[in-house]
Image (cartoon, helix red, strand yellow):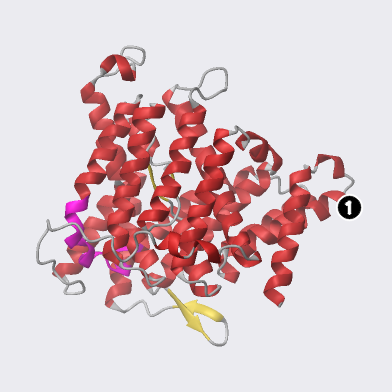
Amino acid sequence: MERYFGFKDFNTSYKKEATAGLTTFLAMAYILFVNPMVLGDAGMDKGAVFTATALAAAFGTLFMGIVAKYPIALAPGMGLNAFFAYSVVLVMGIPWQTALAGVLMSGIIFIFITLFKIRETIINAIPQDLKFAAASGIGLFIAFIGLKNAGIIAENNATLVSLGDLTQGPTLLAIFGFIVTILMMIRNIRGGIFYGMVITAVVGIFAGLIDKPDKIVGAIPSLAPTFGQAFSHFDQIFTVEMMIVVLTFFIVDFFDTAGTLMAVSSQAGIMKDNKLPRAGKALLADSSAIAVGAVLGTSSTTAYIESASGVAAGGRTGFTSVVTGALFLLALFFSPLLVVVTPSVTAPALIIVGVLMVSVLSKIKWDRLEIAVPAFLTLIAMPLTYSIATGIALGFVMYPLTMTVKGRVKEIHPIMWVLFVIFISYFVFLVE
């Protein structure tokens, strides 16, 4: 096994890799409890989503570790789950079963373009500034949801939103959780988000704000409410509205995974001559996990930047991911803890993930108006319209126009014009 994973080449050991795998798991274990809460808002069974989340994460991470040999873990992505629940299901009124079919379709497309090695062409077609704007906009959207769930902001008929009642127990608990989590992260405590949720839940129980769980370990929740629902509604995705949804799933996960692979691989010293070895296998792990996760009953699975915490702990090979994947399987038996994961417990995680995602704002060329305008529309429209798709659509429509007026039409990739037409159709469809 040491020879298969190349321990000698990376000067690593079982102890280093196991420690790194545990570190990565703790850094991203929050998704096991946040994802059921988010998708539960869309009407999905939380127990089934918990099981689907753990299984999809285990499948993708083990695939990444054993086949691609990368120390990178996968799980249903933040932002993608928010788009699924709040934009597609709650705002657009699409049944969650049909939305799962859309996720499955995006996974199939991913597998196709990965096998035919055309991912790079699409990556290069979309301007880097719009990628940064989309990531930042999703961060703002996630943070907005977290602030709303915490009760820190509330609906206001006069101003749309305003400051909530900060004297309410659940809101105070969320604020406490946010402060505790931030302090741990500032101190570089690995797994800070997960530990913050644990501490917040414990304090909530002692304060009488959260019900105490009957047990810690229990039977694995049934997948029956969600398993295979994507197949039963697959014929309903061939509409303009659903094609836009599929395209958005595709674009968001596309760049999320590409960015994570590049960042973590560079940190681990895996990249050679600015290229990723076994890149096709790594991308196939991601695309296969999306399809498998959709069949099980969860939103799109993607590579997690939290994998960098495992690399920082010494992880260099796929064995790190094998350990992380095994821990996700073990986590299946801890579903009774779902009862303590209330919105007050998950809200700090959502807000902090939002903070981390907007960090790329500084990389956008704000001094060039033809770039600044579409980038700004992309990121600001997501929280204000409660829709990731609308933000992406506005930015992708405006970019070719501003660049053309500026006289930089030759810099616009033909694929961007195709997306321009698609998103114009999207707005026309919504008007109808």
Which residue is pictured at 75% across the width and 63% down the height?
Answer: 424
Compared with 335, 288 (above or below) is above
Which segment is the magenta one? 332-346
Can residue 380 be seen at all in this image of the molecule? Answer: no
For image coordinates 36% across by 68% down, the residue present is 44
Whether residue 364 is visible, yes or no, is yes
Is residue 293 or residue 74 the one in the foreground? 293
Image quadrant in which the C terminus is located: bottom right
Q: Main secondary structure of the magenta part?
A: helix
Task: Judge by depth and name the residue closer to the eye, 180 or 142.
Answer: 142
Is residue 181 toward the left or the right of residue 432 in the image? left
Q: Looking at the rendering, in which quadrant would you find the N terminus? A: top left
Return the x and y of residue 172 as percentages of the image width and height.
Answer: 30, 71
Residue under label 1: 405
Q: Nearer the viewer, residue 164 or 95?
A: 95
Position of residue 55 relative to residue 177, above or below, is above
- Residue 422 horizontal side relative to residue 356, left or right: right
Query: Please, what is the three-letter code of the amino acid marked with disc 1?
Result: Val
In this rendering, the answer to whether 252 lies above or below 410 is below
